């Protein structure tokens, strides 16, 4: 997938057209590191408070950690569950993005919280709690995922594994970071490893199930951890070699794909509709 135009990332710069869209306390956690990267691009100049991305993920994850394994079920579906923590986490992240950034905001829970002014404009993608079922059951495999995208290209992203307090993030030029420290993708030996999943919407599709099963034969080890965002973060870091899933949603993978891209990996998305189920493949090499 081709790279999108470069971002101009400026920390702490107040934009003249930023206006709060929600009332209430919009204070955000200050994190102990900063990234200041400026890239000129004649076709596009986008000013982003990159610290906002990281602070939003961190504050939301800190709240979720305090509620881990003590979740309140909001809606119980036949094959899924929605938690009160999903919605509260979304509200925390969205409040900052809506008030301190001019771009559109898309969320798993609320759809378009603010639509982009044009199809070419960047927009934020929020998955406020990826791995809700794991979270509810006390399984420590869940994360907050936030990405800035243009079309189907992730420009920047963060995946916060709040149980382990590992915030993995990227920007357009500075590579991959974990808790503010630059990291290189680990080169681990042994059989190749793939993370996958079977979304509820595709289980009754025999053709899709057979296609998915056949594709697994090329891998030495196959894992299902219940969080696409965390799976892709691990691919980016070198803990896993690949990720593949059919029927996944854009908000599940956008943040993690930004990390894979920054680590030098590759990915494909077999659809160009951000509201449709997707077939996504990624690898770290």
Image (tube, grey):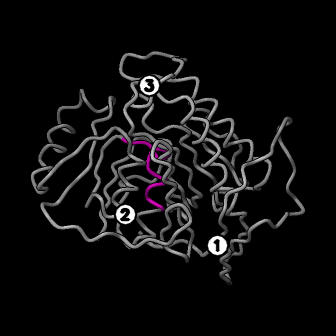
- Residue 237 numbered tag: 2
Name the mark nearer the viewer: 1 or 3: 3
Name the residue tied to disc 3.
136
The image quarter containing residue 27 is top right
User: In this image, 51 relative to 233: left or right?
Assistant: right
Identify which residue is drawn at 68% across, 75% down. Answer: 36
Residue 92: where, in percent of width, then height?
68, 38
Residue 211: where, in percent of width, then height?
17, 44
Q: Nearer the viewer, residue 140 or 197?
A: 140
Q: Furthest residue to the right? A: 16
- Residue 76 numbered tag: none
User: In this image, 163 relative to 204: left or right?
Assistant: right
The C terminus - image quarter:
bottom left
3D distance between C-alphas at marks 1 and 3: 37 Å
SS of the residue under disc 1: loop
Identify which residue is drawn at 44% across, 50% down. Answer: 253
User: In this image, 210 relative to 227: left or right?
Assistant: left
SS of the residue under disc 2: helix
3D distance between C-alphas at marks 3 and 2: 26 Å
Residue 205: where, in percent of width, then height?
23, 31
- Residue 7 numbered tag: 1
3D distance between C-alphas at marks 1 and 2: 23 Å
Task: Say whether disc 1 or disc 3 marks the residue closer to the N-terminus.
Answer: 1
The image quarter containing residue 118 is bottom right
Packing grade of label 2 (10 A; few <14, some 14-19, many >=20) is many
Q: Which residues are magenta?
A: 248-258
Identify which residue is drawn at 64% across, 56% down. Answer: 53
Vertically, is 253 above or below 137?
Answer: below
Vertically, is 196 above or below 176?
Answer: above
């Amino acid at each position: 997938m081709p790279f999108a135009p470069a971002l101009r990332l400026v920390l702490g710069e107040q934009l003249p057209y930023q206006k709060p869209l929600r009332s209430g306390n919009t204070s955000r956690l200050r994190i102990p590191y900063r990234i200041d990267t400026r890239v000129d691009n004649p076709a596009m100049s986008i000013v982003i408070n990159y610290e906002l991305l990281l602070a939003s993920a961190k504050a939301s994850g800190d709240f979720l950690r305090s509620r881990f394994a003590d979740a309140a079920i909001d809606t119980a579906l036949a094959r899924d569950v929605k938690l009160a923590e999903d919605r509260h986490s979304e509200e925390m992240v969205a409040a900052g993005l809506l008030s301190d950034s001019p771009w559109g905001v898309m969320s798993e829970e609320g759809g378009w919280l603010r639509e982009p002014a044009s199809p070419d404009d960047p927009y934020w993608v929020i998955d406020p709690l990826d791995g809700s079922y794991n979270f509810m059951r006390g399984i420590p495999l869940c994360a907050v995922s936030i990405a800035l995208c243009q079309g189907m290209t992730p420009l920047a992203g963060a995946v916060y594994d709040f149980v382990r307090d590992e915030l993995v993030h990227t920007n357009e030029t500075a590579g991959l970071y974990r808790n503010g420290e630059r990291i290189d993708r680990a080169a681990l030996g042994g059989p190749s490893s793939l993370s996958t999943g079977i979304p509820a919407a595709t289980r009754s599709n025999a053709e899709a199930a057979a296609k998915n099963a056949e594709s697994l034969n090329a891998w030495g080890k196959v894992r299902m951890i219940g969080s696409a965002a965390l799976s892709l973060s691990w691919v980016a870091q070198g803990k896993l070699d690949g990720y593949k899933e059919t029927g996944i949603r854009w908000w599940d993978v956008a943040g993690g794909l930004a990390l894979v891209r920054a680590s030098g990996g590759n990915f494909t998305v077999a659809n160009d509709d951000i509201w449709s189920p997707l077939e996504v493949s990624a690898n770290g090499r």
